[in-house]
Amino acid sequence: MSIETLSLKYKNSKLLLLDQTVLPFEESWVEAKTPEDMYNIIKTLKVRGAPLIGVTAALSLSLYAKEEASSELFKSKAMYLRESRPTAVNLMVAIDRLIAVADKDYSFENIEAEAIKIFQEDVNLCEQISIHGAKLINEGDVILTHCNTGGLATAGMGTALGVIHKAHTQKKNIHVYVDETRPLLQGGRLTTWELDKLKVPYNLICDNMAGFVMKTKKVDKVIVGADRIALNGDFANKIGTYSLAVLCQYHGIDFYVAAPYTTIDFDCETGDSIPIEQRQPFELKGVRGHYGQVQWAKKEGVSSCNPAFDVTPAELVTGWIFDNGVYNKDNIKNIKDILG
């Protein structure tokens, strides 16, 4: 089986992943030869985005199954990889599906078939999300988005950015404001890179400009992605999302979250139960990458708080754009029905 997308290549018993830490200046590919490689690639954000993390972890384990005949050792490595990111529930969903296959009938062929199924499903889910979401976009809309939610975050065309992409292909004459998205700058580095490729007009802004833009410019909608959604509609997304939702409520702007059903945690009743990953202080004290390092706060003696995500309560959400349609505050309580 051969797969090639914007962010991954799976062919000839190799898994190559686009290194997102060196974008937008360099397009470099890294190989995940082992589950340990995949763990490090996820942990260091060479691959990120909840859906893509799940897909690439599954494909990595598929290659491991080709070499490992023991189902017990396979499940041990799968559980190890399951811990690489604590907030993105898509990872847990994908790993659990492979473990279920291993429990039933462990073989490379069966594991690979399930991993390919997980990949193809995400492609299809993104397409359906984009179709439903684009119906909410009007001619000439100005949309603000946060972090990165396109082909660098999924196996398909994306979630929130997939909606934007679809509306653009429908020639709706849209314009996008892109939050820089501190502290990792995934909006400034990655979303702008994708929008350039898609030829979607945009302006890059830093996060604390969002309120100014809403007040003084035309912003019709905010659309973001999610890393985990609770059964009541609360959701975790890149830090700064909650602030946008509050700003939208004050300014009377529609606030949407776009995600596949695999981002719903069916064991999580409310956002209070979503684990929030805490990242290293250096990400706040400066920036580092292939371009070098810049430090603007002292390495020692400066206390910091660096959660990777925040939780937005359902009461601030206008609508949830899923692969099976758009939910609102009145019917989000039926979210369990999404599994049929």
Image (tube, helix red, strand yellow):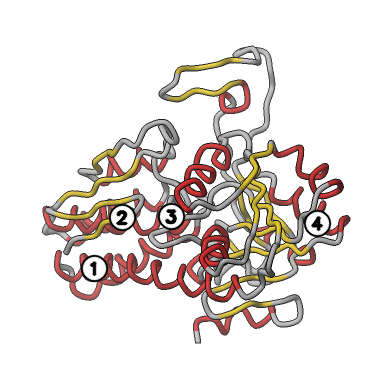
Q: Looking at the picture, which amino acid does disc 3 mark?
A: Gly
Residue 295, compared with residue 283, is above or below; it is above
Q: How crowded is mark 1: few (under 14 residues within 10 Å), some or many (20 or more)?
A: many
On residue 78, the disc is 2
Q: Mark 1 points at which residue?
A: 102
Identify the residue at image location x=40%, y=53%: 53
Q: Distance between the residues labelled 1 and 3?
A: 29 Å
Q: Looking at the picture, which amino acid does disc 4 mark?
A: Cys
Q: Which of marks 3 and 2 is in front?
A: 3
Q: Distance between the residues labelled 4 and 2?
A: 40 Å
Task: Out of 315 and 93, give the one closest to the viewer.
Answer: 315
Q: Which of marks 4 and 2 is in front?
A: 4
Check if mark 1's residue and mark 2's residue have beta carbons within 8 Å.
Answer: yes
Q: x, y (%) of residue 291? A: 44, 21
Closer to the chain start, of discs 1 and 3, is 1
Q: Is mark 1 on a helix, strand or loop?
A: helix
Q: Is mark 4 on a helix, strand or loop?
A: helix
